[in-house]
Amino acid sequence: MNKKIIRVIAVIAIALTASWNIKQSKSEPNKMSNLAMANVEALAGGEDEMCPNGCMENGSGCLCHYWFPTYKEA
Amino acid sequence: MKNWYIWILILVCSSCLSNPTTEKKQGSRSHIINIHDKITEIKIDSILLSGSTRAFIMNNYLIIADYKPEDKLIHIFDKATFKYLTSTTYTGQGPGEITIMGNIGINENRNEFYVSDHGQFKIFTYNMDSVIANPFYMPQVKLNIDKGIFPDRYQYLNDTLSIAVAIKPTGNSSFEQYTARLNLTTGKISPMPYEHPNIEKRRICVAASSQQKEYIECYQNRDLMTIGGLDGKLKWNIYGPEWNKDNHDRKYYFGGVLICGDKIVALYSGKNYYDKDYRPSKIILFKTNGDYIETLDTGYIINDFCYDKTKNRIIMALDGDMQYAYFDFSNIKQVDK
């Protein structure tokens, strides 16, 4: 009986966690992830393999996942 | 064959029609005036600015956007005295913060400016009076930016029409640029119908004027300026002396453009794009039909510039010991060609 109750509580907890996560992601669809935010400078510096050329300082705009308006295309 | 002269006449007429007056070639732009001594430094001692800033004029204020700030992102000055007034907005993702600051759109009628955030994909509205009065001012969201095609720099004309450089990503790091009409109420971006047929990779800067009813598109990677009506129809293509050179993808030509009253004012480099000091140090003046007037050689590397119409003055963000400076058009003897 105890095991059954624990299982039910576990299922409810997982369901609540999942729905909370979905709600969070829907409410802020355009927010940068913390990882992306932390890596903004690295991405722009060409340290990301998805963006090999990177961007250089002092330009009129460069795309590296995000748009960097004052960087320069390599 | 009897009517051969008719065919010749038709040929001559058709060649006249296929060489319309829209194409203007300027083989030399040789009237160069050195204005180094006419440039006055703007001393900014109250705050620390990075080397990556842009300047905007709005009514009585000079707005300086700092893209690598020590502290806040946006600084407000009195444009007549250059006295520092206030600063606003930190970098970040929280309420009232900007993640990756983009262009600042100026709406003088409403005393508002619009700050693009390319990290949060939004444009925020700032009311100038509130920014000055309230150090904890929170901007409002004006618009969500579409990731598929979005505005970079733009010139605000009214709520439904701004002329923008639109960016269309084609990969993680590749993109196309267009001159486009931007509706800041709906967010809709409509590329201008005219594109020069001989250019594959467009890297451009734009300006526009309601008074002149035209937009200017200057190429960074070609010695070319296109002038069109606000309806999108081509008026003139202005080809510079280096238009036909083969090494144009390594060269940097126009670094910015403004319409100042009855003149087009363009930053011009002509230097190698991969040089350290590739940025423009010259300013070319054109009439609004693209006819060349003269070249002003400042002797300074110019990162950005803006126009104060009440003082008839150009304010420049410079690369060097002198960060900001200005010159007055009234102090420069101009050639009336």
Image (cartoon, coloured by chain):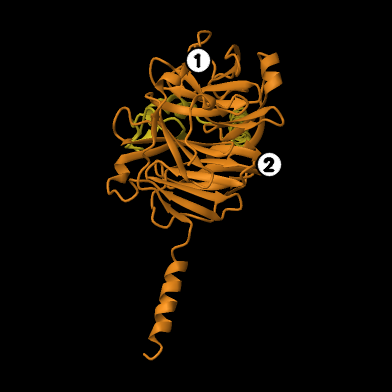
Chain colours: A yellow, B orange
Residue A72, quarter of picture: top left
Q: Which mark is residue B185?
A: 2
Residue B238 point in image, percent of width and height: 44, 49
Q: Which residue corresponds to the image point at 50% horizontal and 15% vertical from the top-left?
A: B42
* Figure quadrant of the N terminus of chain B: bottom left
Depth check, front residue: A71 or A6? A71
Disc with the residue nearer the chain's start (1 vs 2): 1
Residue B165 in view: yes
Element under disc 1: loop
Which residue, given by chain and number where applicable, does mark 1 sit on?
A: B42
Residue A69 point in image, percent of width and height: 46, 32
Q: Which residue corresponds to the image point at 52% horizontal and 33% vertical from the top-left?
A: B118
Is residue B12 depicted above or below B227 in this figure? below
Dot 2, crowdedness within 10 Å: few (<14), some or many (≥20)?
few
- The single residue placed furthest to the top in the displayed view is B46
Residue B134 point in image, percent of width and height: 69, 14
Depth check, front residue: B289 or B173? B289
Asked whether, in this view, residue B218 is left or right of residue B142, the answer is: left
Is residue A17 depicted above or below B249 in this figure? above
Depth check, front residue: B43 or B90? B43
- Tell me whether marks 1 and 2 sit on the same chain: yes
Q: Which chain carries label 1?
A: B
Asked whether, in this view, residue A36 is left or right of residue B30, the answer is: right
Dot 1, crowdedness within 10 Å: few (<14), some or many (≥20)?
some
Q: Which amino acid does label 1 sit on?
A: Ile
